Amino acid sequence: MSTRPRFEPAIADQPADFASIMAHVPMLTSRFFDLYAEFWQRGVVAVELKEMTRIRNARITDCGY
Amino acid sequence: MRLSWITSAEGTAGATPLEQVLGQCPELLTRYRAFYKAIWEEGLVSRRVLELCRLRIAAIHGCDQEWSVRDACVELNDAELQALETGDRSAFGVEEQAALILAEQIPYQHHQVTDQQTTEAGHQLSTPGAVALLTALAFFDVTCRLKLTLDVAALPAQLAEPPLNRGALA
């Protein structure tokens, strides 16, 4: 697995992180964050439970990001 | 076996199986549909390549719910469909094969994707195109997992509109 971002950021002077690389596809990114925000802002599942499963999922998939 | 604990939202008669279940969270459904549709609307990756990759990932997952949905604007012959089922990439062009290799790695071998592969994808598609392709592959994978976990029904569909308007949600 790569240990460095594989694409240059789309935003000048920004580090190559998830948001700045996804900015290469602005419409997709905008709608992705709309969707992702929905997970956290609404619903009957507690935020703490969502965060616990998010971190567990990151560990299982070995996603250090 | 269908999961009996997931019920369809009220007022969703006639909607696709996944829409009926996600209709329990209407705003989530709206945003999911808008995001998924954007993969096609960005237009950075050819519709044929998206279809090949979507079906290949469905085949890897054994996801009949996704496999049974087809983009009517992409004509695939029986040999190509069989090749997608079995993983025979020789039926496809060089750039299609490169995309299919990435598609095959996303479900269970994403750590094996190499710097060289992503660099080549950037050269073939441009950086925005490569980012769009990888995002699409990740969400084809997610959608298969979601459909399998929700155990929605598999309904064959040929979709001429942007397929994710209803297609990916079928």
Image (cartoon, coloured by chain):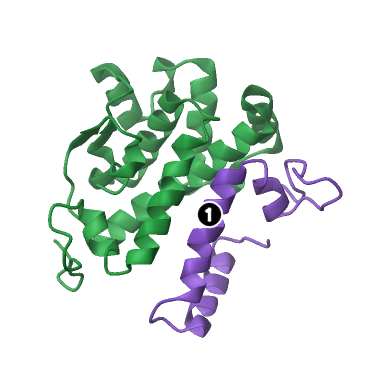
State left or right for residue B29 relative to residue B120: left
User: Drawn colour of chain A?
Assistant: purple
Residue B123 lies, with reference to residue A13, above or below; the image says above
Residue at 68%, 54% in the rendered image = A19
State left or right for residue A18 relative to residue A29: right
Residue B49 lies, with reference to residue B24, above or below; the image says above
Name the residue nearer the viewer: B101 or B15.
Answer: B15
Mark 1: give few (<14), some (14-19) or many (20+) Cα within 10 Å: many
Label 1, on which residue?
Answer: A32
Q: Secondary structure at mark 1?
A: helix
Where in the figure is residue B47, as x and y percent of width and height?
A: 43, 27
Residue B12 lies, with reference to residue B35, above or below; the image says below
Name the residue nearer the viewer: B153 or B97.
Answer: B153
Quadrant location, the N terminus of chain B: bottom left
Q: Which of the chains is green? A: B
State left or right for residue B155 relative to residue B146: left
Residue B158 in sight in this render: yes
Residue kind at label 1, given as amino acid type: Phe
